[in-house]
Image (cartoon, helix red, strand yellow):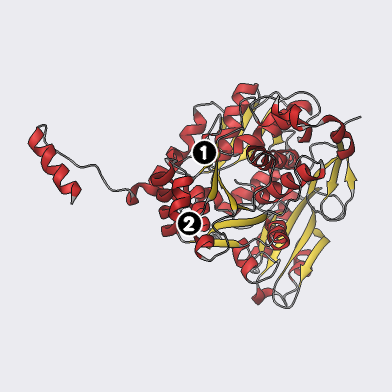
Amino acid sequence: MANLKVRITFPETKIREPIIYNAGKNYKVVTNIRRADVNEKTGWVDLELLGEVEEIERAIAGMKAGGVKVDPIERNVIE
Amino acid sequence: MSKIKGLVCKECKKEYAAEAIHVCEFCFGPLEVAYDYEYIQTKISKEKIMNGPLSLWRYEDLLPIESTPTVGLHTGFTPMIHAKNLGLKLGLDHLYIKNDSVNPPTLSFKDRVVAVALTRAKELGFDTVACASTGNLANSVSANAAQAGFKCFVFIPADLEAGKILGNLVYNPTVIAVEGNYDDVNRLCSEIAGEYPWAFVNINLRPYYSEGSKTLAYETAEALDWQAPDHVVVPIASGSLLTKIYKGFHEFERLGLISNVSTQIHGAQALGCSPVATAFKKKTDFIQPVKPDTIAKSLAIGNPADGFYAIKIAQETGGVIESVTDKEILEGIKLLAENEGIFTETAGGVTVAVLKKLTDQGVLKKGESIVAYITGNGLKTQEAIAPAVGAPSLIQPNLKSFQQTLKEEAK
């Protein structure tokens, strides 16, 4: 079992989509929101993903394909 | 007694031991070092600082290490120049340049943060240090690790230009080139940092690493005869540097080393990667990530972790966060070189161009004291400035040819 902390950023066009619900439904991952700031136009969610590494990676790919930005919790680590 | 109380979450204030951790397990907020300022007050004084080493370690009492410094013993204490020529050009009487383009050993301000991170890494028992970087950070970690005897891993995107990695290979670290786009490389590095018992300087050691930037504020105040300036102009990549310069001035004030701090903290970004400046102008604290497209590669952080905090500080101090075009960046580099004889990299061009812009806007005024932070050396980004500096005058090996050229030059 692995866990990964990510920051998801929603563009305005995706704010109404149940992206996190879908990740939990479509992949074998547990989604656990720790902190968030979402409004009608945009928003971000700090999320913990629990599961096997491959499933977490599939869930991230699925969320990205759904149109949200998924970064590590540290955001940009390449300086 | 120790000056370090531990780590504390910037968001929920949950406390942790001073270990190699960087994220709050409860709210996922960033951790920072909590100091015992009452204890530090009994140790620190202007006299002690002035009699200290000619390096950033003269401020050791305010840096997050528990034993004696072991890395970067010659880092910091860089020149602070009264930029009279540039000031005359811009109409500013008290303009100062803090020149970290000559910071040892690798000619950027990153040597400050890495000196602190690697000293702390040694204290915490690490034998391997690492970073993910496309430039200055990799240079600094590689060089300092070589001197300090650490094993060193540097992660880079596989499509990085060969020239950029030469400056690292010479120190003989293990350089891993990762295939994939920026986001893929970025995420992998975060995952590796979670898997291996290494000191990733800007990930699990970030609470200590980032504190090294405070020394730019300490040195500024000391050079101004123990006063904080009216304004500072700071380049923004992750936003961490700006927040730590603010913290540095206010720590000095809290400890009675300076008084009446009312410094306006201004931020500088390249227009092609300006998520913080954009949010500041929109008066929102939501940073919309961007895909960088600018010549200022060392500031090209599209999703900056400390952008939110940088905006808060600019707002609180009456500062402004501005952005400038690539053309203005090149003009900024030339303006500094032609007037002060300092060749800075593109990030410095951003700072000077924003300095000019804020002066033109009337934000910075003639009689005020202003400090601009020049954080890197132009020799590292020569390809960026090459198209803008012209070419030598070619002559034949005889006096007549030289005299002819001289006449043409005079025109």
Label 1 sits on residue: B101
Give me the chain letter of mark 1. Answer: B
**Where does residue B353 sit, x and y in percent of width and height?**
48, 56
Residue B332 in the figure: left or right of residue B189 = left
At horizontal 26% and vertical 45% (from top left) the residue drawn is B391
Would you say residue A28 is visible in this rendering? no
At horizontal 61% and vertical 26% (from top left) the residue drawn is B74
Which circle marks residue B6 in the picture? none
Element assignment for label 2: loop
Q: Quadrant of the N terminus of chain B?
A: top right
At horizontal 75% and vertical 69% (from top left) the residue drawn is A22
Give me the chain letter of mark 2. Answer: B
**Where does residue B129 sit, x and y in percent of width and height?**
67, 31
Element assignment for label 1: helix
**Where does residue B273 sit, x and y in percent of width and height?**
54, 59
Q: Do labels 2 and 1 share a chain?
A: yes
Circle 1: is it few (<14), some (14-19), or many (20+) Cα within 10 Å?
Answer: many
Q: Are marks 2 and 1 in contact (CB under 8 Å)?
A: no
Residue B283 in the figure: left or right of residue B333 = right
Circle 2: is it few (<14), some (14-19), or many (20+) Cα within 10 Å?
Answer: some
Q: Quadrant of residue B175?
A: top right
**Where does residue B240 sit, x and y in percent of width and height?**
68, 49
Above or below residue A28? Residue A19 is below
Would you say residue B33 is visible in this rendering? yes
Q: In which quarter of the image is residue B320?
A: bottom right
Residue nearest the viewer, comparing B363 with B260: B260
Which circle marks residue B91 in the picture? 2
Amino acid at dot 1: Ser
| Distance of label 2 from label 1 (alpha carbons) | 24 Å
Residue nearest the viewer, comparing B15 with B403: B403
Amino acid at dot 2: Gly
Residue A35 in the figure: left or right of residue B366 = right
